[in-house]
Amino acid sequence: MRTYLVTGGAGFIGSNYIHYMFKKYGDDIRIINVDALTYAGNLENLKDIENRPNYTFVKANICDKEAIAKIFAENDIDRVVHFAAESHVDRSIKNPEVFVQTNVLGTAVMLNCAKAAWELPDGSFKEGKKFLHVSTDEVYGSLPDDENAFFYETTPYDPHSPYSASKASSDMLVKAYMDTYKFPANITNCSNNYGPYQFPEKLIPLIINNALQGKKLPVYGDGKNVRDWLYVEDHAKAIDMVQEKGKLFETYNIGGHNEKQNIEIINIILETLQEMLPDSDPRKAHINQDLITYVEDRKGHDRRYAIAPDKIKRDLGWEPETYFKDGIKKTIAWFFEHEDWMKNVTSGDYQKYYEDMYSNR
Ligand code: NAD
Ligand code: TYD
């Protein structure tokens, strides 16, 4: 039985990945989820699997060497899937330091502990051990408004925000471990994800939540920045395929050719909400374009992201399975069914963050 150490498994993509893995492998794998439970970590995301005998949660910070080394000492870890990170660009602009700590130092701790646990006396590594570093397409910088320009695995790194700079630094550390020690790892660089359990500071859940509450829908700048949206379960599947079928030491870009301007996304959400809410729902009356409010642009706002997923498609046969029109419906339906989840995560700390972030916009 393979044992996985998943970091950041209580966050958005990590919790979707854990659900995906149990759905796929059932009792044939064991997962240890290590998460510090920051504002973005929520054990409610894993409620339905928390009592599985093959699942363990450990509350620890990935910067805490002793805590991470202890997990490796007490368990024969076969796979590391490293999600834990500070993940929100706007927060990184306000407070870059914690991004360096978690994303760079935390990754160094994870690499070091895995290396110490897996290295043999001759400097080679125990058979079959693998580390997968989950990263972002934002490390490649920004593309022009030219529909033929894409990010490839060979595109030079050119990060702009403190978030993407910290992720680029962590990718470089993983590359350094692969090059220097032949440390058995892969890196994946994925485009923007959306789906269940996404924290409502990110565009899609924020717009769904605000529209349902009749709050303003803040559009940064001219609303024409482009992101390449992927349904989170398709990302989870790609991560598993890269780790099991990918070539060690390689990077794989993950994306589904689903580029959309932010304003298009907002309009699709408004239309889909109108379509899905029953006529008897009083919220229907206020869900319209009048809620759209253009606000001050994000500092250093990257214009366009677009992944060329040719390599993962050609070498591993991965393709996204969820069309955006279906994925957005599934996501909205999930938010309808989980109003308590939204209430819980939008109380307390997040409410204060929201007031700070949007008070001048
Ligand atoms: P998220 O913010 O929803 O979750 C991050 C998780 O990491 C949370 O559970 C949090 O508690 C945990 N965490 C944060 N700091 C920690 C620390 N110091 N020690 C231990 N745990 C800590 O993020 P997400 O959107 O799920 O992203 C997961 C990963 O995927 C990140 O590495 C991110 O860079 C990458 N990624 C995200 C996207 C996206 O669209 N969200 C796209 C591509 C790549
Ligand atoms: P976001 O979800 O923060 O992801 P990222 O910055 O990592 O791509 O933002 C997606 C896009 O939406 C980005 O161009 C910024 C824009 N945006 C808004 O226009 N309004 C908002 O309130 C937010 C959160 C984002």
Image (tube, rainbow, N blue to C red):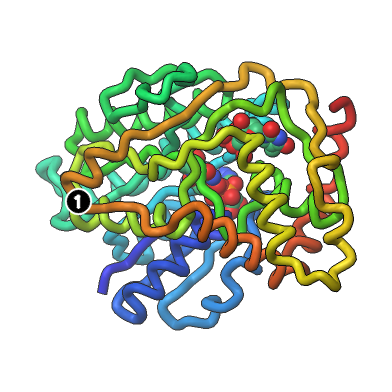
Residue in front for this viewpoint, 234 or 114: 234
Against 240, residue 184 (above or below) is above
Q: Position of residue 155 (x, y in %)?
A: 31, 22
Say which residue appears at 85% left-offset and 40% top-offset: 290
The foreground one among 343 and 194 is 194
Residue at image position (79%, 51%) is: 211
Q: Residue furthest left?
A: 122
Residue at 68%, 42% (x, y): give it: 266
- Relative to 206, does residue 153 appear above or below in the rendering? above
- Which quadrant is the C terminus positioned in? top right
Q: Position of residue 1 (x, y in %)?
A: 26, 74
Label 1: which secondary element: helix
Looking at this view, is 7 or 311 the one in front? Answer: 311
Instruction: Kindly tell me whether residue 36 is visible in this rendering.
Output: no
Name the residue at 38% across, 53% down. Answer: 81
Could you say where residue 71 lies in the image, as x and y percent from the top left? 42, 60
**Residue beneath disc 1:** 316
Left or right: where 150 falls relative to 126: right
Is 336 located above or below residue 12 in the figure?
below
**47 left or right of 313?**
right
State the image quarter where residue 209 is shown. Answer: bottom right
What kind of residue is marked 1?
Answer: Leu
Give neighbour class at mark 1: few <14, some 14-19, many 20+ (Cα, 10 Å).
some
Can residue 77 be seen here? The reply is: yes
Image position, residue 89 (x, y; %): 62, 31
